Image (cartoon, grey):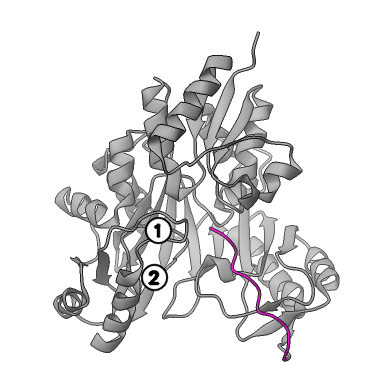
Amino acid sequence: MTTPLLLLVESNTTGTGRQFAARARDLGVVPVLLSADPARYPYAAEDGLRTVVVDTADDDALWAAVTGLAAAAPVAGVLSSSEYYVATAAGLAARLGLPGPSADAVRACRDKAAQRRALAGAGVPVPRFSVAGDVAEAIAAAQWVGGPVVVKPVQGSGSLGVRLCRDRYEVADHAKGLLAATVNERGLRTPGVILVEQYLTGREFSVEVFGEEAVVTVAKHVGAPPVFVETGHDVPAVLPAAQAAALADTAVRAVEALGLGWGAAHVELRLDGDVARVIEVNPRLAGGMIPELVRRARGIDLVGCQVRAALGEPVDLTGTPDAAGAASIRFLTAGAESVLADVAAAEAAARAVPGVVDTALYRPAGTTVVPAEDFRGRVGHVIAAGTAPGESAEAAETALTLGLATALTPATAGVPVREAVPV
C-alpha cells in the first residue's frame, strides 16, 4: 500500500517547520515540502525531506503539482507553518476534501484591517485603529487615534515593519516607507494600505488557542520602543485570576468572531487596566519557540496536535504529568553593532546554568550583528525549564547574561554586517 502524504506548503525558516515534518514521519505519513525555493530551508536537505519545486504564489501551478502528487499517492493532509501560506494550505485542503480551517476566514484574519473590523463589530476589545492608504491619511488617522501610535503593515509577521511613532513627522516617515513597498519580504504583493493604531502600554501576553479552547497564556517580553522585537516568553504567565480569565476568554471570543475554531491560533493581547485588548490573531501556531515551551512546561505537543488535526486524527490537549511545570526562553539581541566571538565558550557557559535545556547562537564566530529591528535581528536563544515560571525565567536570564551575551564584543572595522535571516 502506498504511504499517504502530508503536503507542507512552504515553511517558516526557524522553529516549527522542521518539527512538522518530523511529527508527520512519527505518524507514518510522508511529509512533502512544496516550495518555490527549497534551499531557503536548510533543514529540508539536512533531513532528506522530499521536496517539489513549484511557484507557490501561482494557484494553478500549485494545484497542478498537488494533483500530480495525489495521482501517485493518497494525500492525507495539507498544512503550512508559514504565516504567509496558511490561507493557501487551507484552500488546498478544502479542494481536496481534507480537514482544515475555513480558507476565507484565514484570508480575512491575515488582513489585520479586516480582522480589526470583524473583532470590533463582534464587541471584542481592540485598540483604537484606522486604516490609511497614503501618508496624509496616516497622519489624519494618528491625530484621530491620539497620542503615540503604532504604524504597521496590514499583513506580515515577526514584528516586521511595526513601529511606534510619537509625532506626525515619524508617522509620515514610516508610513511613506511602508506604502512604497509593492511586495513583502517573501516577494508577495502587498495590499497598499497600512494600520494606524492606539499604543497600549500594558503588559503583553499571548494565548495559545486550539480549536476553541485556550490552552495556555504566555507572558511576553519585548524590546524597547520604537520597535517591538520579542525578546522572551514565559509559560505559563503568572497573573491574578481575573486578568487570566479576561485574557483567555477574550482570545477565545476573538477566534470565534473570526470564524476560525480549527487547529491552532496564536492570539496576542495587551492588558489595558483589567481589559484584555486583542492586538492581533494569527491563524497558525505561535513562533518564537512558544510551542516548544508549551511542550516542556505542560507536556502538550502543539505541533503534533496540528499535524494530527490535519490528518483527521484525534487531538489530546490534556498534557502529561511528567512535564516540568514552567519554561522560559530569552533571545539574545545586540545593543550596538557587535562581533560574535568565542561562540563555543558562550554556549557552554549558558548550558552550564542549572535548568537550561537548550541554547543556540545562530551565526558563527566573526559575524557582525546589529541592533534588532524585528525577529531577524535576534542572535541566539536559551530555553530553561523549572517547576515554576520564576525559576525558569531566572535560569534563562542568567544563561543569557552570563552565557550567550559574553559572545558579543564591540565591532571592529572591516567585518561585514551579517545578512538578514530570510523570512
Q: Position of residue 35 (x, y in %)?
A: 55, 42
Q: Residue at x 56, y 27 (%)?
A: 6
Which element is circle 1 on?
loop
Q: Residue at x 28, y 58 (%)?
A: 191
Q: Quadrant of residue 356?
A: bottom right
Residue 416 is a magenta residue: yes
Q: Residue tagged by mark 2?
A: 162
Dot 1 or dot 2, earlier in sequence:
1
Classify 174 as above or below 54: below
Q: Position of residue 220 (x, y in %)?
A: 49, 64
226 vs 317, nearest the viewer? 226
- Which numbered circle lies on residue 156? 1
Q: Is residue 20 visible?
A: yes
Task: Specify the segment rendered in magenta.
Answer: 413-423
Classify 381 as above or below 140: above
Give the alpha-carbon distance from disc 1 to disc 2, as whole Å.
Answer: 9 Å
Q: Residues within 10 Å of mark 1 (few under 14, many from 20)?
A: many
331 vs 324, nearest the viewer? 331
Image quarter of the N terminus: top right
Q: Is residue 255 visible?
A: no
Residues at circles 1 and 2 in contact by the CB criterion of under 8 Å: yes
Amino acid beneath label 2: Val
Amino acid beneath label 1: Gly
